Amino acid sequence: MGSGTEWCLQKRDDLRTDSFSGNENVPETGSLSIIVLGASGDLAKKKTFPAIFHLYLQGFLPPDEVHIFGYARTKISDDELRSRIRGYLVNDKSASHLEDVSKFLQLIKYVSGSYDAAEGFQLLDKEIEKHEISRSSQEGSSRRLFYFALPPSVYPSVCRMIRKYCMSKSDLGGWTRIVVEKPFGKDLDSAEQLSSQIGELFDEPQIYRIDHYLGKELVQNLLVLRFANRFFLPLWNRDNIDNVQIVFREDFGTEGRGGYFDEYGIIRDIIQNHLLQVLCLVAMEKPVSLKPEHIRDEKVKVLQSVLPIKDEEVVLGQYEGYRDDPTVPNHSNTPTFATVILRIHNERWEGVPFILKAGKALNSRKAEIRVQFKEVPGDIFKCKKQGRNEFVIRLQPSEAMYMKLTVKKPGLEMSTIQSELDLSYGQRYQGVTIPEAYERLILDTIRGDQQHFVRRDELKAAWEIFTPLLHRIDRGEMKPIPYQTGSRGPAEADELLAKAGYVQTHGYIWIPPTL
C-alpha cells in the first residue's frame, strides 16, 4: 500500500476521535450528515462546498459514512444544485479528479424550504433520517453538522427550527453542531442579543463561530512559533519589541458589494474580528495546555486588558469613487480604510502599540504581521539609518516568514546592509498543498475541536473594545478622509504610524525567492 493511501487512512482514523476536545476520545462511528443552509448562495458555492469536497478527496469524509444536504429557499432540483456547484470544484488542480467530482456530487441532496417555517425543516429531517437509516446508523449515534451560509438576521429562526425538528439524539455519541459565520452582530448590544437567542437553544460546545482567519496556515503557526522556539521567549515583550503591526490590504474596492459593505464598514468587516483574533495569538500568554478552553481563556485575558481606543489614535479613510456605487448612499460616512492603535495594559505589553490597519482599493494586496524590534543600544556600526530588526509573517499571498536583520555587505569594506533570514513556504515545502482555511475549520468542527473558533465571552470582549468607536463613526462624529484608489491610503495614517514609533525601512524590499 502506497504511503499516500496510508496517510489518508490514518487521517480517517484520526477523524473518528475528537482532537483536544475534552470528549475523552469517544469513538464516532455513526453516519455524518453535513447540512449547508443557504446552499444556493455565493458563500456556499465558492467556499463551503469546495472545502467539503477537498476533505472528501483526502479521505476525511468516507462516502460510506457521509451525506451532504443543501437547504435554501430557491426552488431547484438536486441536479440543478450539483451543476451550480460543479464549476467551483473543477479547476486545473482537480482536472485529474473529474471522476471524484462526479461521485462527490452524487452525495448531495437538495431540500427547498423557508427559514422560518416548519414544513421545510420537517422535510429536511426526513431526508437526513433516510440517509442515517441507509447507513445503518444506531439510533443516537448519528452526527449532524449544520453550516449557516446565511445572513445573521435569520440565525434565530433557523436555530429554532433546527432545535425543534432536526436534532440528532446524542445518547450514543451522536451530536448536533452549528457553524455560524460573521458578522456576529453590529455592536455589543446586537451581538449579545444574537448570542442570547442562539444560547437559549444550543449549548456553547455545540456552537462554532467561524472566523476563517483562524484557519490560515501561518495564523495556526503562531502558537508553535512563540512557544516551541526558545529564542523567541525572552524577546517577546516590551523590553525588546517597539511596535506590532497587523495589516490587511486589498487592491480592489467593494466590487458590487457596496450596499452590503456600507452597512458594516472596514472595522466591522475586518478589524474587529480577523485582525483582533490575530492580535490575541500574538499577544497572549502561554496556555496551560493545547486544550481549546485553555487557549481561549488566554485570548480573553488579552482582550480584557485592552485600554479604551483614543480618537487621536484612529485614522479613517474612504476611497474616491466609493459613493459612485448606486447601492451606496450619496453621503455615506462608512470607512473603507482604518488604522487603529490598541494598547494592552499588562506586564508584557505596557507601552507597546498594536497597530491594526485595513483598507480597500489600495496599492497592493497582502495580509501580514510585522513585529518591529527596538534599536540596538550603543550602535558602533552606525547602521541605524538602515532600519530596525523586524520579524514578518506574511499570511497571504506567498505565505512566508522572514527576519529582517543587518549584515556585513560582501566585499572588502566594513559596511552594513539589511538582509533577511527567509522561510518562504512555496520554496521550502514544494509539492505540499496548503489547505484552505475553511477545509481546516470544517474538519475541526467534525472533530469537536473548538480551539480555532470564537467563544461567547471572547466575542463580547471584542465588541466592548470597538463599540464606542463604531458608535461615534455611526453618529458622524468621526469622518473618513478621502484617498486615491491605488494609493497607500490617507497620508495621515503614515503620520500616525510614525507618532506611534514605527520606523519605515527605506531602500529595502522583501522579494519572495523563486524556485
Image (cartoon, grey):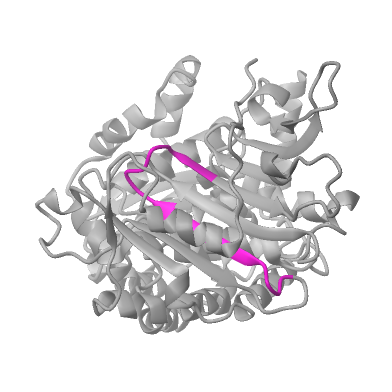
Q: Residue at x 22, y 66 (%)?
A: 333
**Of 360 and 118, the residue lying toward us:** 360
**Vertical order, 179 against 432 (above or below):** below
Is residue 351 inside the magenta stretch? yes
**Of 16 and 307, the residue lying toward us:** 307
From the image, which quarter does the N terminus lie in? top right
Decide if residue 57 is on the left or right side of residue 116.
right
Q: Residue at x 72, y 31 (%)?
A: 419
Give residue 66's position: percent from left, percent from top.
52, 44
Tally of marks = 0
Residue 497 visible within the image: yes
Give residue 182's position: percent from left, percent from top.
41, 62
**Of 359 and 30, the residue lying toward us:** 359
Give residue 17's position: percent from left, percent from top.
72, 53
Is residue 294 inside the magenta stretch? no
Residue 136 visible within the image: no
Q: Residue at x 63, y 49 (%)?
A: 370
Give residue 11's position: percent from left, percent from top.
70, 39
Residue 449 found in image quarter: bottom right
**Vertical order, 432 against 339 (above or below):** above
Residue 128 found in image quarter: bottom left
**Vertical order, 2 against 378 (above or below):** above
Magenta region? 349-367
From the image, which quarter does the C terminus lie in? top right
